[in-house]
Image: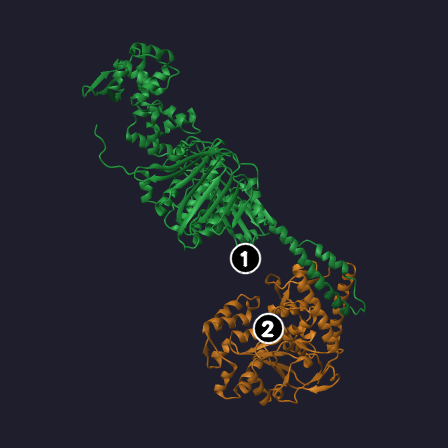
């Protein structure tokens, strides 16, 4: 059993956030009192300021930053929106309530802060993430999309009404939603030695049925396509706090390859955030080379698949090694294979044959 | 020499047959055109004598109960100089009688329109025209006349003389018209005429008895135009031919009138012998007129007296062959007499027949052509400067006309023949008429197209009492409003090509543009004279004027915009700063809100950051 030695990290992060919010509040308050126009300094998220940091192996923002000042009339409205969001997040976190992106859009109207549409309020949320360098999940703001986790992992809730309550994530075979309460829970202990992130819900269920968690001493995470931030954050915590290696199984196409890459080193969209990546995560498959090796049934790529390959070939992370090689093979094949393709050789073929083989192979990556 | 055999058509008859051309195509248009012609003549007459115009226009139905089109009595009364009673029958009873043949800016051309209106009235109602005139301030002459269309002659029905007190002219005609259709155009016409003639007082009484009065806005009249010689660029072959063969250079016809003239100029009381006459003429040579000199010269070569002169007709004076050919009525045969080149009269005849040298002709007969320019031109056109213009062949005249058009070193046409309204009267008119929030006017410097000088004046007005119905353009040419065929006019073209958004004008702005083109010849597109053609020179001037004014308007709009912005800013800060304070207070964990009033005040004052 791995037991976490550090203090309750969820609680620590909450305190850090509340203190950051208070600092911002004090800063604005003092400016107003002195007759000065308060302003926010927001790291620039323009393409020119997004760079790939090889050292920490993720996209990060450069040094450029923008000032949003209440002095500038054209920025006054969005400045106020940002101040409101900080105020609202402060309430959410203190009261232990969670909210969705859509909720925020509507909640603003109670304070005569009018967002024209949800994209505008979503943008302000990203602004606050950048100002406080914290993901929105820490603000208790969640997207609608949910993914799941299953395996021997004990957690301790921190949400109101459940504080201190513990729970093992292997009790329910459908898995557990990675929602606000799970995201804010403390990770207590686990017997697992591995985390398997899998792209599809169907395969996730198959893995549970086939007791992959037992056979491979694994925690299984369903990313439900491109992994949401809360899922990526959980994967990172399992990796850093519990010391578990992370492997990824995705469809044998360019999108599957990139799902693995985003878990490993983040996305440009979240370049203003840290702690969402698992730099040591390993992409098990399905590789382009696996399609031929395992004689998988394939379907032809679409135009947009091919265009996506060309796009990714410009990404600095695809300039070498296996990542580069697999893109080239995909481009050569112009065909793709889904995880379900293994069912051609029997429903358990993927868990019995492919997974062990790739896990063995991964030791040499 | 045989008489012309083909029959002539009188000018009256010509216009009667072609009345559509002159704007008398239907009762609606005819009523409008008649109003225009009389009002414009009245204004021209006042302008000419520098009298501040006082114009009364009235239109009355003969039988108000009748439906349109019906007979109307159109009366225009002015306070101009009036017309000498002896000229009235000819001026109003014949077509093509007028004094407007010189080259200067005037509203109408040649004064044909008024007679056309009289003609039209007579054709449609068979009623005479009534003209009341007082030219000396003492007697008032009243004529009632009809036109004899075939003979182009007036038929006076009645002529009375009364005591008068003020100079002026009143013309009244009865004509078929359609006021229900023409009314709005006529009211527009009177309104716009008043706008471009702010020094006039104009009253219009319509058939219903309603009075439209436009009082005088300015007391100063614009500088009157002067009559000038033509510019070489505005000349064609026909005009040159006319200039060369006009009376100045013609071999005079010898009749009793001419002999009386000679006797008068030489102060001959009794009959003298030819020799004595020549001696008398020699003494006074520099004082006597050119035709008389010519006749004297002929007398010297033929050695005849006045009685003899009456019996012959001079057919040709051939200077090159030094012969005079004449027809003797008594003998019914032709004679040729040799000229003695040593005679002092030879030179006189030679210069009469052959005319001036080209150099003299150019400098004397055209505006702004000096000897230097004339010599350069001769070189350019490959003519000898001392070439006698009377000796030019047809081909040479065509070549000359062509070269006059092409030579580029002539000075620009003299604009002194133009009478723009002037910036101040135009501006005052605009202020009075539209009471705008902003107005600007500009008079461009004179320019020219094809030898015709022109000046563009323009005004722009925005806001105030102008309704926000979109841009409205008032077009004027030589102080005449142009009301028809707006779409194809060059001014409209320029206005429509303007990107108004660049000047901060959007939507349906309360915007008025007043454009006035003055020229000795407005380049109308059609005979209707309602739309001006897009000559490049004119287009450029209009564009420059409009851009200049639009920029001024844009400055005004920016200032206006800045004021609006300050208000908007004040509103924004009053709305948002309290909210920011509320959020910050809770975030900072404070109980009391910060004092942010100062910030709201500052917020509404700061300039927009770039």
Judging from the image, what secondary structure is the residue with disc 1 in? loop
Quadrant position of the C terminus of chain B in the picture? bottom right
Residue carrying label 2: A262
Q: Is residue B457 left or right of residue B68?
A: right
Mark drawn on residue B507: 1
Q: Are marks 2 and 1 in contact (CB under 8 Å)?
A: no
- The spot of residue A80 in percent (x, y) is 69, 65
Q: Is residue B486 above or below residue B151?
A: below
Viewer-nearest of labels 2 and 1? 1
Q: Is residue A309 left or right of residue B590?
A: left
Subunit of label 1: B
Residue B202 visible: yes
Q: Is residue A71 above or below residue B437?
A: below
The quadrant where residue B370 appears: top left
Q: Which chain is orange?
A: A
- The spot of residue B247 in percent (x, y) is 34, 26
- The spot of residue A177 in percent (x, y) is 64, 83
Characterize the local packing of mark 1: few (<14), some (14-19) or many (20 or more) Cα atoms within 10 angstroms.
few
Characterize the local packing of mark 2: few (<14), some (14-19) or many (20 or more) Cα atoms within 10 angstroms.
many
- The spot of residue A190 in percent (x, y) is 69, 84
Q: Which chain is green?
A: B
Q: Is residue B154 left or right of residue B161?
A: left
């Amino acid at each position: 059993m791995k037991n976490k030695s550090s203090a309750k990290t969820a609680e620590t992060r909450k305190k850090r956030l509340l203190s950051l919010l208070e600092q911002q509040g004090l800063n604005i308050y003092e400016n107003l009192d002195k007759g000065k126009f308060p302003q926010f300094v927001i790291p620039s998220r323009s393409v020119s300021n997004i760079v790939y940091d090889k050292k920490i192996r993720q996209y990060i923002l450069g040094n450029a930053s923008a000032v949003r000042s209440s002095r500038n009339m054209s920025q006054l409205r969005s400045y106020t929106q940002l101040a409101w969001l900080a105020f609202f997040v402060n309430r959410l976190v203190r009261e232990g309530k969670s909210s969705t992106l859509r909720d925020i859009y509507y909640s603003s109207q109670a304070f005569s802060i009018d967002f024209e549409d949800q994209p505008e309020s979503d943008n302000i949320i990203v602004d606050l993430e950048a100002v406080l360098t914290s993901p929105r999940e820490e603000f208790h703001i969640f997207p609608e999309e949910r993914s799941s986790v299953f395996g021997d992992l004990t957690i301790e809730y921190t949400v109101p009404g459940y504080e201190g309550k513990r729970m093992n994530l292997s009790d329910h075979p459908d898995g557990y939603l990675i929602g606000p309460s799970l995201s804010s829970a403390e990770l207590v202990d686990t017997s697992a030695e591995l985390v398997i992130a899998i792209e599809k819900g169907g395969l996730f269920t198959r893995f549970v049925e086939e007791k992959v968690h037992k056979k491979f001493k694994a925690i299984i995470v369903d990313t439900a396509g491109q992994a949401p931030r809360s899922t990526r954050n959980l994967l990172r915590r399992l990796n850093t706090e519990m010391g578990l290696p992370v492997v990824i199984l995705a469809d044998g196409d360019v999108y599957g390859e990139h799902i693995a890459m985003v878990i490993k080193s983040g996305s440009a969209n979240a370049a203003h955030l840290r702690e969402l990546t698992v730099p040591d995560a390993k992409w098990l498959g399905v590789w382009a080379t696996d399609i031929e090796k395992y004689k998988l049934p394939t379907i032809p790529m679409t135009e947009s698949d091919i265009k996506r390959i060309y796009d990714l070939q410009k990404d600095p992370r695809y300039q070498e090694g296996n990542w580069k090689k697999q893109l080239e093979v995909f481009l050569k094949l112009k065909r793709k294979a889904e995880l379900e393709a293994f069912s051609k050789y029997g429903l358990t073929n993927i868990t019995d044959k492919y997974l062990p083989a790739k896990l063995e192979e991964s030791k040499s990556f | 020499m045989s008489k012309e055999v083909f029959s002539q058509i009188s000018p009256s008859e010509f216009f009667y047959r072609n009345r559509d051309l002159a704007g008398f195509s239907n009762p609606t248009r005819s009523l409008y055109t008649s109003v225009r012609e009389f009002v414009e003549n009245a204004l021209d007459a006042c302008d000419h004598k520098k009298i501040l115009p006082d114009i009364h226009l009235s239109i009355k139905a003969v039988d108000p109960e009748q439906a349109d089109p019906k007979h109307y009595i159109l009366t225009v009364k002015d306070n101009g100089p009036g017309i000498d009673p002896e000229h009235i029958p000819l001026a109003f009873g014949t077509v093509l009688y007028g004094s407007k043949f010189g080259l200067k800016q005037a509203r109408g051309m040649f004064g044909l329109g008024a007679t056309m209106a009289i003609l039209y009235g007579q054709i449609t109602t068979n009623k005479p025209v009534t003209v009341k005139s007082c030219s000396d301030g003492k007697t008032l002459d009243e004529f009632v006349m009809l036109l004899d269309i075939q003979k182009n002659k007036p038929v006076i029905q009645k002529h009375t003389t009364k005591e008068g007190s003020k100079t002026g002219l009143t013309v009244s005609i009865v004509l078929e018209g359609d006021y229900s259709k023409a009314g709005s155009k006529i009211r527009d016409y009177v309104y716009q005429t008043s706008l471009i003639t702010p020094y006039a007082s104009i009253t219009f009484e319509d058939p219903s008895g309603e009075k439209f009065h436009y009082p005088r806005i300015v007391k100063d009249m614009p500088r009157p135009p002067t009559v000038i010689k033509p510019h070489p660029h505005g000349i064609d072959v026909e005009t040159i031919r006319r200039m060369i063969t006009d009376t100045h250079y013609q071999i005079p016809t010898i009749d009793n009138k001419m002999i009386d003239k000679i006797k008068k100029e030489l102060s001959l009381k009794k009959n003298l012998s030819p020799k004595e006459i020549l001696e008398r003429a020699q003494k006074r040579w520099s004082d006597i007129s050119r035709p008389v000199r010519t006749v004297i010269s002929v007398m010297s070569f033929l050695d005849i007296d006045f009685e003899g002169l009456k019996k012959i007709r001079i057919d040709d004076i051939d200077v090159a062959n030094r012969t005079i050919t004449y027809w003797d009525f008594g003998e019914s045969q032709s004679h040729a007499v040799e000229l003695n080149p040593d005679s002092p009269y030879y030179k006189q005849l030679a210069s009469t027949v052959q005319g001036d040298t080209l150099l003299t002709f150019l400098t004397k007969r055209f505006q702004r052509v000096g000897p230097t320019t004339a010599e350069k031109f001769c070189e350019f056109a490959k003519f000898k400067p001392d070439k006698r213009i009377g000796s030019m062949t047809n081909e040479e005249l065509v070549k000359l006309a062509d070269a006059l058009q092409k030579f580029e070193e002539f000075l620009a046409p003299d604009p002194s023949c133009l009478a723009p309204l002037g910036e101040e009267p135009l501006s005052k008119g605009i202020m009075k008429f539209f009471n705008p929030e902003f107005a600007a006017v500009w008079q461009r410097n004179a320019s020219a197209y094809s030898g015709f000088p022109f000046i563009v004046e323009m005004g722009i007005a925005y806001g105030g009492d102008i309704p926000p119905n979109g841009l409205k353009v008032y077009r004027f040419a030589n102080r005449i409003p142009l009301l028809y065929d707006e779409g194809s006019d060059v001014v409209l073209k320029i206005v429509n090509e303007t990107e108004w958004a660049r000047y901060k004008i959007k939507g349906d702005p309360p915007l008025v543009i007043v454009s006035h083109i003055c020229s000795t010849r407005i380049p109308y597109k059609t005979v209707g004279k309602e739309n001006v053609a897009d000559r490049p020179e004119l287009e450029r001037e209009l564009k420059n004027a409009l851009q200049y004014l639009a920029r001024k308007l844009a400055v005004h709009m920016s200032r206006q915009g800045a004021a609006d912005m300050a208000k908007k800013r004040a509103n924004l800060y009053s709305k948002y700063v309290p909210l920011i304070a509320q959020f910050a207070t809770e975030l900072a964990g404070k109980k009391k809100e910060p004092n942010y009033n100062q910030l709201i005040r500052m917020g509404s004052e700061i300039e927009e950051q770039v």
